[in-house]
Amino acid sequence: MTVGEIKVTLKNKLAELDKLHSRVEEFLKAQGSPQKVLFQLKLALEEVFVNIVNHGYDDDKEHDIQLTLSYEPPELTLIVEDDGVAFDPVHKENPDLSQPLSCRAPGGLGVFLVKWCCDLKYRRDHGKNILTIKKNITHDHDQTSTGDK
Amino acid sequence: MDIIEEKNNDIAVFKLNGSLDSNTSPAFEEKVVAAITDGVAKIIVDFAGLDYISSAGLRVLNLASVKLKPANGNLVLCALQDYVREVFEIAGFDQFLPIVSSMDEAVIKLS
C-alpha cells in the first residue's frame, strides 16, 4: 500500500535545485527515512535533474520536469519525466576510476553515482524520458532515522 | 553553504559548512583555484560541517588535484561523515587523496 506520494514540478533551471532538495528532504523525513538514504536520494535526484537542465534541451525555452515521489514500504520510488532529448543513463558507460585523480578530467561522475546508490529503469515514451529510481529504505539497519515520530 | 578560508603557515584550510552541490560548488571552485594560482601548494578541506555533496563537489576536488600536480602540491580531506566518505571511495578518490579523520591528522600529513 502506498503510504505517501507527492508530485513536484520543476523548471529546467539550476535555481530550482534548492526547491528539489527541500521537497525531497521534507518527503523522506516524513517517511522516517534513514539519514544515509536521504543523502543518497538527494544525490541521485540532483544528478538526474542537473543533467536534464544542462544537456536536455537545444532551445532556450522553459520546460517542466515532473517528479513523483512515493513510498510503499519498504520501497521508495522516484519518477522523473522530462521532454528533453532522449537520454538513457542506465546504459551510459562507467568512467575509468583507476586513473590517478590528478590525471583525470574533472566531471562525468554524476550518472555513475546514481547507478551506484539506486536501481534505475529508463524508457522513452511519447517524446519523454521517463526514469524510475527505486531504493529500499530498510537496506541498512544500522542507520539513524531522520524521522521525528 | 558557507566556506571559511584560513591560513595555517603555508597550508590553506577550507572549512565547508552545509551543502556542496551544483549551485554552491562554483564559489568553492573559485576560492580553491585562486589559492593555487597564488602559489599555495598545501590544501586541507575540512568536511566537519558538511552534510551533503554531489558530483559537482567531487569535480572541484578533482580539479584542485589536477591543478596542484605541477607544483607537487598536496590536498588532504578531513572529518568526513561516513556516508560522504563512501562517495569518495566509490568514485575512487580515496586511492589518490589522503582522507583522515581530524584536522590535527591532516596538518601532520602535510608537515
Image (tube, rainbow, N blue to C red):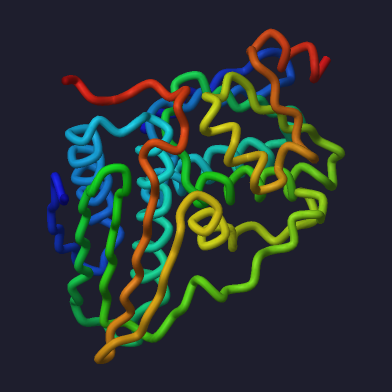
| A131, B68: nearer the viewer | A131
Q: How many marks?
A: 0
> Which residue is depicted at the point 68% across and 64% down?
A95
**Residue farthest along the top direction in this orientation:** B104
Residue A57: image quadrant is bottom left
Q: Which quadrant, please, contains the N terminus of chain B?
A: top left
Residue B68 position, x and y percent, is 76, 42
Residue B22 position, x and y percent, is 41, 51
Residue B103 position (above or below residue A62): above
> Which residue is depicted at the point 46% across and 78% down?
A88
Residue A31 position, x and y percent, is 21, 36
Residue A75 position (above or below residue B14): below
Residue A54 position (above or below residue A86): above
Residue B75 position (above or below residue A97): above
Residue A39: image quadrant is top left
> Which residue is depicted at the point 33% across and 79% down?
A129
Residue A45: image quadrant is bottom left
> Which residue is depicted at the point 83% across and 14% down?
B111
Left or right: where does residue B21 sit relative to residue A30? right
| B106, A96: nearer the viewer | A96
Left or right: where does residue B2 sit relative to residue A69? right
| B65, A133: nearer the viewer | A133
Residue A14 position, x and y percent, is 30, 59
**Residue farthest along the front direction in this orientation:** A1
**Residue farthest along the bottom direction in this orientation:** A126
